[in-house]
Amino acid sequence: GESVGLHLPTLSVQEGDNSIINCAYSNSASDYFIWYKQESGKGPQFIIDIRSNMDKRQGQRVTVLLNKTVKHLSLQIAATQPGDSAVYFCAENTGANSKLTFGKGITLSVRP
Amino acid sequence: GAGVSQSPSNKVTEKGKDVELRCDPISGHTALYWYRQSLGQGLEFLIYFQGNSAPDKSGLPSDRFSAERTGGSVSTLTIQRTQQEDSAVYLCASSPQGRGEKLFFGSGTQLSVL
């Protein structure tokens, strides 16, 4: 069936370095993608989203890249800080329905 | 309130008991979602409400699960005859337009079935 998945379950980075979190999706009909951050004991928090008519979108310290050819999505975090430590989820929507399909999540751990 | 509110934050129950989980969405948001998150897992879609339309119940795992949304606002997720495998965090989200975009999540209800 269709799925959204993440390549690595955990990522450890040095404080101040850039982080890259990758996500693969299998539904070529997906036209909307979104990244969430979830801290312990909290609900997922919106980070950034992108539509399929774009291949890059920037926010504050974050950039999302979309490669539709290989069905790949990535989240780049610049100058990673301890407060960035969390679980990150990518999610997709085909537009034909009204719900997001989530991947399993990847844990980002920032070393001081 | 400013965000999605869920209650209780924690619920411990015995196997076979019924539980009710409550969600107060952001005021003005027409769409409301319930997701389930098992330990170390992603979010599993359960049910979706949009305005006065019939809810999308395609994610409910069994007929023990049901949900309603009264007056287009507050929603209650009910689990009857709880089982240990129902233990999870139940997350509610709302969005302004219901296109499955930019959902705003509550902090969830941690359900533990003993």
Image (cartoon, coloured by chain):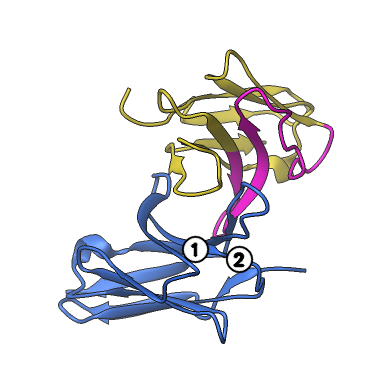
Chain colours: A blue, B yellow
Horizontal relation, residue A11 to residue A2: left or right: left
Residue at the farthest front position: A53
Q: Are marks 1 and 2 in contact (CB under 8 Å)?
A: yes
The image shows residue A94, relative to residue B68, as above or below, that is below
Residue at the farthest right position: B63
Q: Chain of mark 2?
A: A
Instruction: Estimate the x, y position of residue A90 in percent, counting from the top left.
Output: 49, 64
Residue at the farthest bottom position: A70
Q: Which residue is mark 1?
A: A33
The kind of residue on which mark 2 rests is Ser
Mark 1 residue crowding within 10 angstroms, few (<14) / some (14–19) / many (20+): many
Kindly identify the residue that appears in the image at 50 percent across and 37 percent down.
B97
The image shows residue B9, relative to residue B98, as above or below, that is above
Q: Which residue is mark 2?
A: A30
Kindly identify the residue that appears in the image at 84 percent across and 33 percent down.
B63
Toward the viewer: B55 or A81?
Answer: B55
Q: CA distance from mark 1 to mark 2?
A: 8 Å
Instruction: Estimate the x, y position of residue B59 in percent, counting from the top left.
Output: 73, 45
The kind of residue on which mark 1 rests is Phe
Toward the viewer: B103 or A68?
Answer: A68
The span shown in magenta is: B34-63
Q: Chain of mark 1?
A: A
| Quadrant (top left/top right/bottom left/bottom right) for the C terminus of chain B | top right
Disc 1 and disc 2 on one polypeptide chain:
yes
The image shows residue A50, relative to residue A9, as above or below, that is above
Toward the viewer: B70 or B14?
Answer: B70
Mark 2 residue crowding within 10 angstroms, few (<14) / some (14–19) / many (20+): some
